[in-house]
Amino acid sequence: MKLKRLVLIILVTLVWASPNLVQPVFSHPAEVRDVVPRDVGGVTYLNITIWHDIESSLHYVDTLEVTWSDNVTTLAIDPRPLAPDGTFTVDYIMGPVSGTPAITVRARCTVTGYSGALSWEGQIPEFASLAFLLLFMIGTLIAIFLFKKH
């Protein structure tokens, strides 16, 4: 009889205390906010900006998935300090790019998983350094010629 009473007291105590012991986790999925391509010597780099509401040792963005053409690359990343607006950046080296491939970038949070609808999709331009330089020089010469004082 005493054992039943003790078990009943423990169960009632656990049921009463459980809302106070278990706290809900409010977490937003990671969001890929922006992807900015840049060319360095014919190699295309992506500067990827990710927003996440929390970065801790147990809750952080651990993977980026970059898809372009038939390439799917996953990057494992460690917890990073957040800027005041809740963002951080990651550089991804695409290598030489020809044409304007469409890419998709997704971020995976350790709690909420992949960002899904909060991923980034866009096109990366082909950087033709010599052609860009030539056009820039021609444009500069035209501007100088047009605005030259007589």
Image (cartoon, helix red, strand yellow):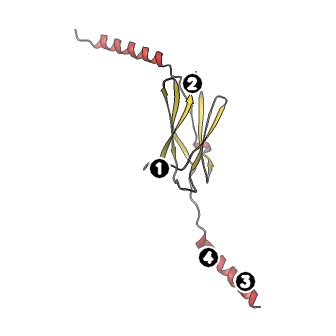
**3D distance between C-alphas at marks 1 and 4:** 35 Å
Pick the quarter of the image with the N terminus.
bottom right
> Tag 4 or tag 1, which sits nearer the N-term?
4
How dense is the environment of label 2, judged by Cα within 10 Å: few (below 14), some, or many (20 and up)? some
At which x and y percent is residue 79? 53, 50
**3D distance between C-alphas at marks 1 and 2:** 30 Å
* Residue on which the image places disc 2: 97
Against 21, residue 142 (above or below) is above
Residue 17 disc label: 4
Residue 14 disc label: none
**3D distance between C-alphas at marks 2 and 3:** 69 Å
SS class, disc 4: helix
**3D distance between C-alphas at marks 4 and 3:** 15 Å
* Residue nearest the viewer, comparing 126 with 149: 126
> Tag 3 or tag 1, which sits nearer the N-term?
3
At which x and y percent is residue 36? 49, 33
User: Which kind of residue does numbered mark 2 sit on?
Assistant: Val
* Residue on which the image places disc 1: 82
At which x and y percent is residue 150? 22, 8
Q: Residue shown at 58%/40% (left/top)?
A: 119
* Residue on which the image places disc 3: 7
How dense is the environment of label 1, judged by Cα within 10 Å: few (below 14), some, or many (20 and up)? some
SS class, disc 3: helix
